[in-house]
Image (spheres, rainbow, N blue to C red):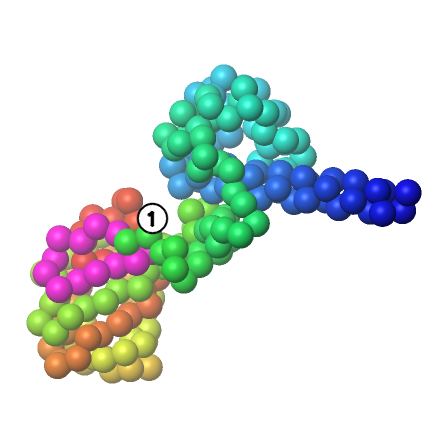
């Protein structure tokens, strides 16, 4: 009897944990799309209270709700089901192997999003190949960065700085700024911006 009880208890705990993971996934996807609880609930045809309980892992996501909720989030229903073995991104963490690349038009620059969907700040890993860089631009917000490899020439408000590994910077994004890798090695910068990635006015930042 004890073994049967233990098995039942374990199954219940696993189900509860699965509900919590699924709720986090739904919340992360909602925030990533800048939707309020009311917005998503209306799109999915469920009540705000029901959606809130799903996101908090207080109730299981029923099959009849999965399809309209997935459609409202513009994902496949399978994307809402998160298994134990998956190293998924959630509301608070981004796994190293699951970073989302951001579109970049500037030559020699690549960006990976480091911050999770619900974050107020946008953290990026900016990789600048030798010769790569941006034109001068400005936009709303504030930014901070630290060079983790190589060197970069950063120009802020017509003042030029040559930054090397370990050097950091911070400035208002409304100041005209640009950066370029004038060295011979690939440069990597952990760059934090107060502006959401989808709102950025320039591909280099």
Q: Quadrant of residue 186?
A: bottom left
Across and down, in percent, residue 195 comes to 32, 51
Residue at (51, 26) in percent of width and height: 66
The 10 Å Cα crowd at callout 1, few under 14, some 14 to 19, many 20 or more, is some
Residue under the point 72% across and 42% down? 11
The quarter of the image holding the C terminus is: bottom left
Task: Say left or right for 114 vs 202.
Answer: right
**91 in relation to 51, above or below:** below
Determine whether 145 is above or below 176 in the image.
Answer: below
Where 34 falls versus 114 (above or below)?
Answer: above
Q: Residue furthest right?
A: 1
**Residue 192 x, y percent position in the rendering:** 35, 61
Q: Is residue 70 one of those drawn in magenta?
A: no
Q: Nearer the viewer, residue 142 or 15?
A: 15
> Residue 167: percent from the left, percent from the top?
30, 80
Q: Which residue is mark 1?
A: 196
Disc 1 is placed on an element classified as loop
**Magenta residues, as a range?**
102-113
Q: Is residue 158 left or right of residue 5?
A: left
Tell me the quadrant of the picture where the N terminus can be found. top right
Please say whether residue 48 is visible from this viewpoint: no
Residue sitting farthest toward the top: 45
Residue visible at 27% across and 44% down?
Answer: 199
The residue at 21%/79% (across/down) is 151
**Quarter holding residue 75:** top left
Q: Is residue 107 magenta?
A: yes
Q: Is residue 27 left or right of residue 193?
A: right
Q: How many marks?
A: 1
- Which quadrant of the figure has residue 58? top right
* Image side of residue 51 versus residue 68, left or right: right
Residue 32 visible in rendering: yes
Residue 122 in percent (x, y) is at 36, 55
């Amino acid at each position: 009897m004890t073994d049967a009880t233990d098995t039942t208890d374990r199954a219940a705990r696993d189900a509860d944990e699965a509900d919590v993971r699924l709720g986090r996934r739904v919340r992360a996807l909602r925030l990533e799309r800048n939707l309020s609880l009311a917005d998503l609930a209306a799109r999915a045809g469920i009540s705000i209270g029901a959606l809130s309980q799903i996101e908090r892992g207080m109730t299981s996501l029923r099959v009849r709700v999965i399809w309209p909720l997935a459609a409202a989030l513009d994902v496949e229903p399978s994307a809402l089901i998160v298994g134990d073995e998956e190293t998924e991104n959630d509301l608070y963490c981004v796994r190293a192997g699951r970073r989302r690349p951001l579109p970049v038009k500037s030559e020699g620059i690549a960006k990976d999003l480091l911050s999770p969907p619900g974050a107020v700040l946008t953290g990026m890993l900016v990789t600048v190949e030798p010769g790569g860089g941006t034109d001068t631009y400005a936009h709303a917000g504030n930014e901070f960065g630290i060079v983790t490899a190589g060197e970069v020439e950063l120009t802020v408000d017509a003042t030029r700085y040559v930054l090397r590994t370990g050097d950091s910077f911070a400035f208002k994004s409304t100041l005209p700024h640009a950066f370029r890798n004038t060295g011979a090695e690939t440069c990597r910068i952990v760059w934090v911006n107060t502006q959401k990635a989808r709102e950025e006015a320039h591909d280099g930042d």
